[in-house]
Image: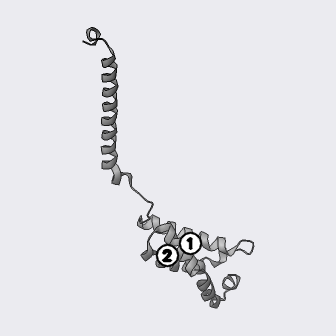
């Protein structure tokens, strides 16, 4: 990467060869979208060239490239809202509402059972 940073972009194919498969796997596992990962990998290498001056000698290249990949993925999420773990609560509102009413019904049924058990323990004259 230091060669690329110095302006020798002929070294970029070597980086592409070494990191393409790893980045592809990383982006697939974080997005869950096989059709999207190649676009994101290309964007990572584009950003590497664009921001090559931000790479420092003191930092580890692997950490830097994965940070670039993470930022590309997050940028895609913000633009397209197509991340597998992104959910809108309103998508589940009906399910939440039906669950709450089911929970309420279960609680009422349990309370009614407890009441009937308590009433059955009372003598006939105290029950009415």
State left or right for residue 121 relative to residue 66: left
Compared with 93, 72 (above or below) is: below
Q: Residue at x 58, y 79 (%)?
A: 50
The residue identified by callout 1 is 69
Crowd around label 1: few <14 · some 14–19 · many ≥20 (10 Å): many
User: Tag 1, which secondary structure?
Assistant: helix
Q: Residues within 10 Å of mark 2 (few under 14, many from 20)?
A: many
Residue 22 placement, left or right of 108: right
In what element is the residue under mark 2?
Answer: helix
**Rendered image quadrant of residue 67:** bottom right
Q: Name the spot of residue 7 as percent of width and height, x first.
A: 66, 87
The residue positioned 30% from the left and 39% from the top of the image is: 101
Residue 40: which numbered mark, if any?
Answer: 2
Task: Pinpoint residue 14: horizontal percent, then vertical percent.
Answer: 63, 87
Residue furthest out toward the bottom: 10
Query: Residue farthest to the right?
Result: 58
Residue 61 placement (x, y as % from top left) = 68, 75
Query: Which quadrant would residue 112 be assigned to in this image?
Result: top left
Q: Is residue 37 left or right of residue 55?
A: left
* Residue farthest toward the top in the current orientation of the protein: 125
In the rendered image, the vertical position of residue 74 relative to residue 5, given as above or below: above
Q: Quadrant of the C terminus?
A: top left
Between discs 2 and 1, the one toward the N terminus:
2
Q: CA distance from mark 2 to mark 1?
A: 8 Å
Q: Quadrant of residue 104?
A: top left
- Badges 2 and 1: C-beta atoms under 8 Å apart? yes
- Identify the residue at horizontal 62%, vertical 74% (top origin): 65
Q: Position of residue 124 (x, y in %)?
A: 26, 11
In the image, taking residue 53 as reference, residue 77 lies left or right, namely left
- Foreground of the two, 88 or 100: 100
Indicate how the structure is coloured in the image.
one colour
Image point 52% across, 78% down: which residue? 41
């Amino acid at each position: 990467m230091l060669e690329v940073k110095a302006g020798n972009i002929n070294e970029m194919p070597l980086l592409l060869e070494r990191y393409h498969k790893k980045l592809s796997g990383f982006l697939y596992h974080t997005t869950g979208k096989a059709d999207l990962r190649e676009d994101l990998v290309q964007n990572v290498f584009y950003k590497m060239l664009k921001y090559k001056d931000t790479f420092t000698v003191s930092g580890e290249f692997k950490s830097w490239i994965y940070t670039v990949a993470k930022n590309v993925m997050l940028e895609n999420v913000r633009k397209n809202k197509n991340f597998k773990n992104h959910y809108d609560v309103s998508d589940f509102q009906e399910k939440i509402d039906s669950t709450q009413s089911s929970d309420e019904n279960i609680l009422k049924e349990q309370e009614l059972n407890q009441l009937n058990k308590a009433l059955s323990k009372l003598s006939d004259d105290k029950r009415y």
